[in-house]
Amino acid sequence: MKFMLNGAVKEVATHPAARLIDVLREECGLTGTKEGCGEGECGACTVLIDGEPVCSCIIPVAQVADAEVTTVEGLNGVHPLQKLFMDEVGAQCGICTPGMIMAALSLGPAPTLDEVRTALAGNLCRCTGYSAIYRAVMKWRGMPVGDTPGSAVVA
Amino acid sequence: MPAVGNSVARKDGIGKATGAAKYADDITFPGMLIGRTIRSTIPRGRIRSIRFDFDTAGFTIVDYRDVPATNAVDLMAQDQPFLVETEVRHMAEPILLLAHEDREKLNAASVEIEYDEEEPLFDPERSTQVFKSIDIVKGNVSAALEKADVIVEGTYRTGHQEHIYIEPNGVIAVPEDGGIAIHGSVQCPFYVIKALRCLLGSAHPNVRVIQTETGGGFGGKEEYPSMIAGHAVMLAIKSGRPVKIIYDRVEDMVATTKRHPAIVRHRTGVTRDGRLVAMDVDVLMDGGAYVTLSPTVLSRGCIHAAGPYRCDDIRIQGRAVFTNTPPNGAFRGFGAPQTEFAVEVHMDRIAEQLGIDPVELRRINALRPGDRTATGQTLRDDCSAHMVLEEAIRRTDFSRKRKEYKGTNRTIGLALFYHGAGFTGAGERNLKSKARLELTPSGVRIATGSTEIGQGTRTMHAQIVTDALGIPYEDVEVAQPDTSKVADSGPTVASRTCMVVGKILEECAHEMKEKLGGLTPAEYYKRSGPFTVERMYEPPDWIQWDDKTYLGDAYATYGWGCDVVELDVDPDTYEVRPIKITAVQEFGRPIHPALARGQIEGGTAQGMGYALLERVVMRNGAMANSTLTNYTIPTTLDMPEMDIVMLENPYPGGPFGAKGLGELPMDGPAPAVVNALRHMGLDVREIPATPELIANCVARA
C-alpha cells in the first residue's frame, strides 16, 4: 500500500493491520515517533494524518492508505517550535516532545492559553508540569507569555 | 557574561525536539533478538512445574540455572533473585526469559507454570519481617508529653505512586570483543555494573554500561534497570547475539518499583500558645517483597518526619517491612513526601485544635539558624524556613484569602517543607564519588557517570566548569556516560548531581586552570598534549554522623519550600479543581534558572498528581489499574496556573552556592492540597484525595 510520508510517496509491504507506529519506526526507520503506552493515552506517538494529530499506536496502517502522514522528521529540524521547546525547557527528558510538537502544530494562528491546554490535553508530560510547553507554544505563535503561568526569581 | 546563573543554550542540542535523539528503543544492532520476561501470576508460593506450549526451536530460553555466578541483584542486600528458583514472593516476579528475532512469535509463545500457592501477606501492619528499623531520640519525649497543655494525635496514610516516566524501562545487551556492552535507559550506570559483576562473576569480567538518552527517571530507573540488564545479558550470553528488552507500559507498571506506601502516626504535645514541646512519630513503610532501597528510603523519611520545626523532645521510630507485593523503591523525594505529608497535615490539625492560625503556628515553630533538628544537627545560615514562609504568605495574600474563601466552594492551604541534599549522614563520605575533566584539542570534556534524564545535568555541569575554568561555554563538552570511559561520580539520585558532583567538577576545573598556567586549553594541548584531572568528593569537614544512634548532621544542607494551593471543590461530587499553586523554594542558587524552574514546575505537578489523582489499586498483590487509562497523571487540563518563586540563600559548600533541588518540589503539594480541603471542613488524612476518598471522610465525620 501507498501513502504520502513527509512529502514523498511511500510504499510499504506490510500487514494492513500493522500499527502505524511500527511501520514508521521499523519499516521506515523514523524513530522520532515514540511509544509511551501503546493504547492512545499518552500521545508520545502523535503524528499528523492529513493535518490532524493522531496517536499512531492505535492506527492500523491500512487507515492511512493514500493519506498524508507527517512525522516529526517531516519538520526537517528547522521548525521554530523545535528550537523553542529546547530554549524554554518545554523539553526536559524529551520523550514526549516530538508528539507534543506534532499536536501543537494543529493550533490556529492566535491561540489562547485555554486553547493550547485543550489542544495538548491528550499528550502527557511527566517532567515539566506543562508550563514551559505553554511558554514555547505561545512564543511560537507570538502570543504574550504574560497570560501563561508566571515565574520569578527573587534574589 | 558568566554561564552560571544564566539560562544558556542547553548541551542537549536540538535532538530531543527533532526526533534525532536516540533512546534505547530507537537503537538496533545486527542480528538483534527481542527479549521477553515470563513472570509469576501468584503473589506467594512455590513453582511446581513449567511447561512450554510452543515450538521452542529458534528461541533462546533462560532460567535461574543459566545464572553465571550469583542469582541476586546486588543492592543493599542480596535477597532479590534475577530469576525465581522455586519460591515466588510477589506477583510479576521474573521466572523465565525468552528471546526470539520475531516479535510476534515471541509474544505468542505460551508458558504454563503450576504453583503450590501459599497464603500471601499484603498488610504491612501485620508484617513481622522488618527490613530496617530506625529509632531517633532527642531529649525525653515521654516526660515532655506529660508536661504539654494539649496533646494532638493523628494517623496519616499515603499510597503507592507510579513513576510514569513516559519512556518505559529498556536495555540492550550487546556481545562485543571480549565482553558485553549494555545500552540502556538508566539513572545509575555504575549500579548496573555492580549488579552485573555479582551476577556474572569472573567468567565475564568485561562489562560496560552506556546510558542512552533517557526518557525520564524520577528514581524509577535507579535500581530496577540492574534487573533488566541482568536479564538481557543472560539472554545475550546464551544466544551470542544482541538482545533488546523494552517493557511495554503495562509490564512497567505491574513489575517495576513504586513509591512506598506509608502509615505515619503522630502524637504531639503543644503549649496553649502553640509551641511544640513533644513530637512522638511512628513511621511504617511497605517495602514489598525484597529489601531493594527500603532501608535508605525509611531513613530519609524518618529524618524528615518532624518537619521543619524545632522541638527539644522528639522521638521518631520507623520500620520498613516485608509484604508479598512487588518491591517498592526510589521515587523523587525518597520517603520524605510521605512523612512530610503527615507532619504538615498534622500541623494544621494542631492549629485547628488550638484555635491558632496555621501560619502563626508555623511562625512560632519553624526552624531558624542555630536551631537543632530531630537528629541534633545545628542548622547554619542556609536555613530559610521563615524566608520561604513569609514570601509565600505575602505573595499569595494568604491571610486575606483564607478568610474570604471561608464558607465558599473555594479554599486555600499551605505546606512548609524542607529536603536534605545529597546522601544521608556519612553517605557521601563513604561513596567517594569522583569526577574527571579531560583536556581536548579544542577545550575540555566532562567525564562522569552522572546521567542526563531531563533535569539538565549536561548543561548545568558544563556551566560550572565554564565559569570555574574561565573558558567559553562552547568549549566544554560532556561525555555520554560509558562506565569504561568516565569516572564513577555516584548515582544520579538524592538531589546530589548539582551540589555534590558539580562541586567536584568545580574543583577539577580549578586544578586544571592552575595547570594550564594562563594558556587556553587549545594552546596547552598544541604545546604539551592532553591531560586529565580527576578528583574525589570531600564533604564538609564539620559533618558528624553516627549511623547507630542516628544522631548528627544528617545532610550538609537543606532546600526549603512553602507551597500555597488554591482550589475549588464541587460540593456534590467532591471533585477537586486546582486553581493556582504558588511554589516558593530556596535551593541555594539556580545554576540555570530555566532548568531549575522546570524542576520545580515538574516536581510540583508530580506532587499534585500524588495529592489528588494517582491511586494505585492493588488486587491480590498486583497493580490492577496498570494502564494510563485508569492510572491517571496530571494532564494539561488538571494542572493549574503555577507561580514559581526561586529564593536565594547560597550554601558555601556547593558549586557557586548551589544546593540540591530535584526532590524538594515533590514534598509540598500534597499536604498543601489536603490542608486546603481541611479549611473547607473536609477532614482528610490520606492521599490521593480522590472524590471517593473525600466522600468517605465526610461520611465518617
Image (cartoon, coloured by chain):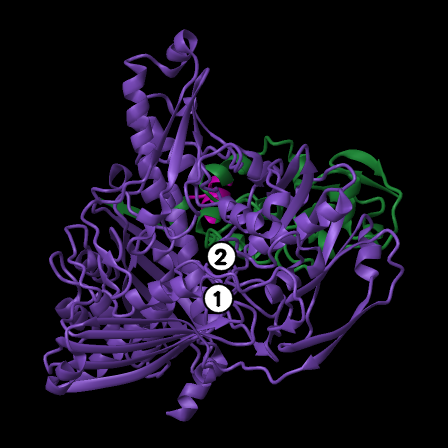
Chain colours: A green, B purple
Is there a contact, CB below 8 Å, between mark 1 and mark 2? yes
Q: Residue at x 40, y 92 (%)?
A: B700
Q: Mark 2 — residue?
A: B75
Instruction: Report x, y in % for residue B608.
Output: 42, 65
A5 horizontally vs B340: left or right: right
In front of the other: A17 or B680:
A17
Q: Is residue B570 above or below residue B68?
A: below
Query: Seen from this angle, which residue lies furthest top?
Result: B527
Chain of the residue under the numbered disc 1 shown in the image: B
Residue range (magenta): A134-144
Amino acid beneath label 1: Val
Give the prevailing secondary structure in the magenta stretch. Answer: helix
Q: Is residue B305 above or below residue B570?
A: above
Q: Mark 1 — residue?
A: B291
Instruction: Residue A92: tell me if it is visible.
Output: no
Instruction: Residue B162: tell me if it is visible.
Output: yes
**Residue B394 falls in which quadrant of the image?**
bottom left
In front of the other: B60 or A47:
B60
Q: Residue at x 33, y 36 (%)?
A: B504
Instruction: Report x, y in % for residue B84.
Output: 65, 66
Amino acid beneath label 2: Leu
